[in-house]
Image (cartoon, helix red, strand yellow):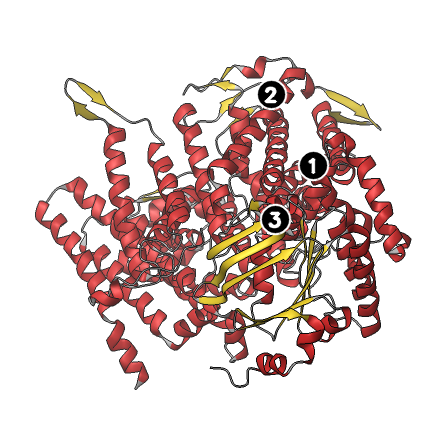
Amino acid sequence: MQVVFDALSLGSLYALGALGIALIFGVMRLVNFAHGDVIAFCVFALLWPSVDAVAIVFAGNLPWFLLIPFTLAVGAGLSVLSEALVFRRFRRANPATMMIASFALGFVIRYFLLMLFSSRPKSISLLPGLSQPVEILGARIPLLQVITILVTLAVLVGLTAFLRRTRFGLEMRAAAENFTMARMLGVRANRVIMGAFALSGALAGAIALILGSQTGTANIMMGASVMLMAFIATVIGGMGSLAGAVIAGFALGAVATVMQVVLPPDARAFRDAFVYGAVILVLIFRPQGLLAARGTKERV
Amino acid sequence: MSLLALSNVSVRYGRLTAVRGVSFTLAEGEVLFVTGPNGAGKSSLLRAIAGVTPPAGGRIDFADHDITGRAPEDIARLGFSMVPEGREVFGSLTIEENLLVGTGMHASTRGWRARAASELEAVYATFPVLKERRHSQAGLLSGGQQQMLVIGRALMTTPRLVAIDEPSLGLAPNVTDQVYERLIALRAERRLTLLIVEQSSTRAMMVGGRMMLMRGGEIVLDGDARALGQSEAMHAAYFGYGEH
Amino acid sequence: MARASILRRTIATPLILSALLLGFALIAWASGSRPFNQTVIDIFLQVILVVGLYTFIGNSGVISFGHIAFACLGGYVAAWTTIKPMMKGIAMPGLPDWLMQMEIPYWAAALAGGAFAAFWALVFGAVLMRLSGIAASIATFAMLAMVNAIYSNWSSVTAATSSVVGIPIVRSIWPYLIAAILAVFVAWAFSVSRFGLALRAAREEPTAAAASGVNIPRVRLIAFVISGAIMGAGGALYAHSIGIVTPDTFYLGLTFTTLSMLVVGGMGSLSGAVLGVLILSSLIQVLRWLEAGVQVGTGTFALPGGVQEIALGAVMILILMFRPAGIMGNSELTGRRARAEKPGEPGHA
């Protein structure tokens, strides 16, 4: 039971991350390497700049009903800002150029945080009420895990409803499939791309909250590993397919958790290495991803 | 009063010039066929008007606005609706969703549903087959049905001018007949202006209207479709005898 | 015939670049200043790594985020083969006996590092080179993360995340100069070889090249292995320049710096790779100096830490925006003005 919850909550993180990356890839073929740093930025936005080891919690002391919207807004804001300042100028660039630009932007964000907070990890306590365990079907599960899973499900349901039922969601799906055609039907390019960035940034904010309360630390590198897994999930899910990204995210979480249990103790430290290796193998046999989306072939 | 006016428009891709110095005007309600051999610059001309490939030189006016270099969505919002070559349906969206994509631009969010519903009924009345399959994925339709879908999708934007790139491409002749039948009927109903690109002039001669012949990025002939189609000049120009 | 003429036409490039590097070395030697010496050594190491990166990226057009993994492999080979056996026994008790007893000179360690990295490049490449475009780039990133994850956790042979100390430090600039010049010549020789030309042709026109019988994955693999070897040797020398290795020495930070140097110089140009290093290294040096603090009047003016990377990132983004093909575009320094001044590829922006 514990394993199932571990797998689901880890998978939730990866799925949310993958979704944030797939959303942007879908509308502008950008592999956003800065996503992980947006996550880290959201965590640090809750702190007051200082280089001390103990974090001076600032916005993090807000009650939860303000804290959550605040973090999501920070993520969305930073993400939209990066679009307006940087990625907008790369609309006509090839995907490789955009990818390197996002890599550079990620570094700028990361070292901006380093400048204000130093590279030392800080301990923080976010939403401390969530660390107590609850009993589910005879297993003691941290409340936070349960909430993580529920929040992810809520986000997924909400996002699906948004994409299926609203005009803006429809425009976004159309743009993700064929951007030029959507524009010829009057869909505003800037609005759709901004929207995708805002959603993606808000998702990064959600990950930041979960990660921050789970680990109890703020570290400028904290987004990097989630981001890498999220990337891998988007690739396996078939670049740009939102459903594929989510499914692949959960699958990766499951694989990682199962490996943690199944691998001999000596090899457990190499869990991530095994996961990466497995991913490379998957890519060999299905370069388009396991669940390749129709009509979203890479524009060469 | 002309709806569309091009003056001295040229289009370049890198060093390659696809359209050189094209000028013409199109009046409201007119039907214009642009014909010419492969590589004559017909599609490039349409893409330039639609704003997909901004022209390298010249000026384009549509509905009393200078649209040279404007974004495709702005041009669409003025009432220019494009059906590009190869149809380009949104394969993963349902038929109804495909039709709805273009309806967002004139309505406020609140008025959108009601307005879209009435437009949908109109398109379904024209193409009943779309209504039958409205909840299936557009990628699963046959070529002819896809062609109807994209024409329907273009109409959903309540355009003043519909530009269609090779509506007969890849369609069986009888399906092409159907598509044209609908187009002609629509034009009468809605006072639509049509700008149709076709490789051959046969269709233009059947339908009638105005015809232009492009070759090497330039307009070489312009006149009544039926008269031109039968003339010697047409054949000479199409195949390029006696030129250069 | 054609071969000889290609060689003659292009040999000027590596010669000019070598002369440039030699110039730097002579200045450092003449100045006799220790810190400056170290700076020049750093520059030569970056040249090796960036030229290694160029050998793959420049010829294949596939962006790799994973090449620093090969430098990591090479760096640890240096640690395994040159640290005194007694110290190895304490830090890395899991090494096999023959390796534990080994104590070879630094240049042999560099060669061994190159060979070890080339071997793993062959293994990884055999799998990765079947991918292309974005999938390939992300897979190389996964490779980097994988190597980092292994080296950060395999405590018995890599001492996990703690520093491995005791690698003999080589302070003379000449070995690094020679290695950098060698790297430049190897990269040049590859890019004018039959394989290099085929690969560049494939980069421009993948379909045409495939149709003309070029086996793209195989030629890419050759480039991958050669560049892996250069990176491995560079990593080993890197270890010898500072005397310490940790897995994070060879991770995202170094990936970022080397990639930005290549991008700024021009991904498609060997001269660009070298010039990118020289230009950005100078910039980094100035920023480091400012971060350390400068006397202005009575007070000191110091930039906060991190400005260096931020500036680097900003330069990289601006170059990508306004000159996506980098300073050199696809052209090389040949000593003939007409070609050297040929503008880069028309921008995408």
Chain to which the residue tagged by mark 2 belongs: A
Q: Look at 64% across and 58% down and name the residue there.
A: A297
Of helix, strand and loop, which one carries label 2?
helix
Foreground residue among A224 and B201:
B201
Residue C243, picture quadrant: top left
- Dot 2: within a 10 Å radius of its alpha carbon, few (fewer than 14), some, or many (20 or more) residues? many
**Mark 2 belongs to which amino acid?**
Phe
Structural distance between the alpha carbons of marks 2 and 3: 29 Å
Labelled disc at residue A70: 2
Q: Position of residue B186 (x, y in %)?
A: 80, 55
Say which residue label 3 marks: A232
Residue that carries the numbered disc 1 in the rendered image = A12
Looking at the image, residue C12 sits to the left or right of residue B146; the answer is left
Residue C109 visible within the image:
no
Q: Mark 1 belongs to which amino acid?
A: Ser
Determine if marks 3 and 1 fall on one subunit.
yes
